[in-house]
Image (tube, rainbow, N blue to C red):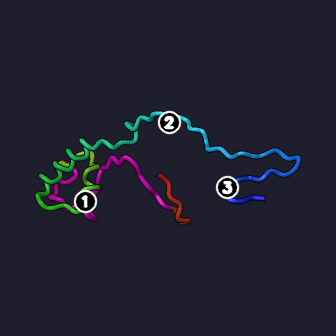
Amino acid sequence: MLRGSRIQPRRGLDVIKRALATHTPLVEKSCASITPPYAKLIQNLEHVRGILNRPLTLSEKILYSHLVDPQKSLAGGGKIRGEAYLQLHPERVAMQDASAQYAI
């Protein structure tokens, strides 16, 4: 029979004691492989800002920072929607299929 946090022994049975989980040391993990190259992304974004010479939306900042060659891709003054292809170098791609499953 349990009362509070104590276990009452029954006749002829061993007493069960609870204990906390033992601590295991964490293995140091290098985050260099999963950290995006922020310096290169910011440098690309500065080139794009110089070419377009206008404020950028958040989606444009994310998209244009991954351009392979901003000078070549945005040579038409930024009129690319429906007229040009962009060469992108993304770090990760998230996709969703018809069953709403994500894959990275």
* Residue occupying image coordinates x 36% and y 42%: 35
State the image coordinates of residue 86 (x, y, percent, origin top left): 29, 53
Q: CA distance from mark 1 to mark 3?
A: 58 Å
Residue identified by numbered label 3: 5
Relative to residue 92, is residue 28 depicted above or below? Answer: above
Query: Residue 44 versus residue 26: which sits nearer the camera?
Result: 26
The stretch in magenta equals 72-96
Q: Earlier in the sequence, mark 2 or mark 1?
A: 2
Q: Main secondary structure of the magenta part?
A: loop
Circle on res. 43: none
Relative to residue 27, is residue 38 depicted above or below? Answer: below
State the image coordinates of residue 71 (x, y, percent, origin top left): 18, 48
* In this rendering, the label closer to the viewer, 3 or 2: 3
Specify whether residue 81 is painted magenta.
Answer: yes
Q: Amino acid at mark 1?
A: Glu
Quadrant for residue 29, please give it.
Answer: top left
* Circle 2: element type: loop
In the image, taking residue 13 as reference, residue 80 lies left or right, namely left
* In this rendering, the label closer to the viewer, 1 or 3: 3
State the image coordinates of residue 13 (x, y, percent, origin top left): 85, 47
Residue identified by numbered label 2: 26
Residue identified by numbered label 1: 60
Q: Residues within 10 Å of mark 3 (few under 14, many from 20)?
A: few
